[in-house]
Amino acid sequence: MSEIRIETDSMGDVEVPANRYWGAQTQRSIQNFPIGRETFVWTRPMIKALGTLKKCAALANAELGELPQDKADLIVQAADEVIAGKLDEEFPLVVFQTGSGTQSNMNTNEVIANRAIDIAGGELGSKDPIHPNDHVNRGQSSNDTFPTAMHLAVVMELVNMYPRVMKLRDTFDGLAKKYEDVIMVGRTHLQDATPIRLGQVISGWVAQIDFALDGIKYAESRTRELPIGGTAVGTGLNAHPEFAATFARHATSETGIEFSEGENKFALMSAHDALVQVSGALRVLADALMKIANDVRWYASGPRNGIGELVIPENEPGSSIMPGKVNPTQSEAMTMVATKVFGNDATVGFAGSQGNFQLNVYKPVMAWCVLESIKLLGDTCEAFNDGCAYGIVPDEKKIAANLESNLMLVTALNRHIGYDKASKIAKNAHHKGISLRESALELGYLTEEEFDKWVVPADMTHPSADEG
């Protein structure tokens, strides 16, 4: 059995592993919430955000005369180690704990206090010269600090996610320009439709990603408003009147991201609409990626007996029984990520609706789900780009063959011979297995010259000019 020390809290003595920086309340949480422990402990972004929060709080309190400078310096030094990831093993708590995140807030307070004590040459657990509540948690409550950490973590992770999504977006944009002149069969209802340019197809994917990013960035801008300074119920009891604004200034300096004091802390603590909005915006990106991934694997289906109009990179064997088979694995991975983001959004949406009076007590699960969605979306965009999108090329022979046999080219004749006659040409060609040209001539509705003049696939990929 490892050595222990005795830590105390308001409920009495608690045995804590002697070699750990956490204290009594963290240990109680470990014992009381053995839920999901084998699969999850707090993510790095949340630990980093909690460390950032405590550092900025100490700086703000010192500036405002609420904390002696020497104590603030010790807290900052310990918090920097938390931010850097040097103390990650000291954060063992799971998501499924108190819904306010109190135990994770106290975990942070205890670790930083004990590490500061260690730096100062004191005795772990003595709360001297740094007390976890009186000094590290000065002017704070879990009810405002934990959601502030949620906001910090989500914003910092979104800022890191944007370049990864843009990498895929820019690859598609390059492909759209490169293949602007490739004319292919359009498809609606999974059936043949009028021609479209491959560049137009891919430009649609680019526009979807742009739309999603616009929504995410707006939601992220609202998440930069912090609930810090509200303390227990939003009134700011025990906090300096200028603490919130001073904290936000230090958070901006520390992260390089502009944060501000939340205008209405009652809303920011009792509801988490900003996170609900971020999650919903992430779902829009997941929707777009689902559509794109499905389009890619359908266009690449085959290679002999499917659509086969796109060729994608061959990354790994696709079957344990069928030699030579290669599957669209990046598309499959991306669509699975999308389903997970959909599920996370459902959790966040429901959890966000469950605020009662002055507090929402679903904070940890909301943070977990939003942060997981951000990470998964960034990962899958980068993987899809590097493992698939970069190498997409059209099979121009297959595209041309499919276009040649496309009965919906007959749509170009509507303006010249009318819908009814054009329909008869298409149905006659389909039922007899002949070409549109052969059908049109057989029915006597137009000459070869007229057919060649009016049925031009490239001309069908933009609005028609009035030819009189």
Image (cartoon, rainbow, N blue to C red):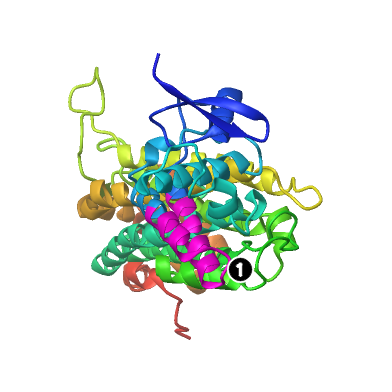
Farthest-out residue, right = 357
Nearest the viewer among 148 and 354 is 148
Residue 201: image location, x then y, percent: 38, 61
Q: Is residue 50 within the magenta segment? A: yes
Residue at image position (25%, 36%) is 304
Residue 258: image location, x then y, percent: 48, 72
Residue 147: image location, x then y, percent: 60, 53
Q: Tag 1: residue type?
A: Ala
Residue at image position (50%, 73%) is 249
Nearest the viewer among 276 and 68 is 68
| Residue of label 1 | 244
User: Is residue 342 visible in this depiction of the protein?
Assistant: no
Can you say whether 49 is above or below 459 in the image?
above
| Stretch of the chain drawn in magenta | 48-77
Q: In this view, does 416 lie to the left or right of 308?
A: right
Crowd class of label 1 (few under 14; some 14 to 19; many from 20; radius 10 Å): many
Residue at image position (45%, 47%) is 112
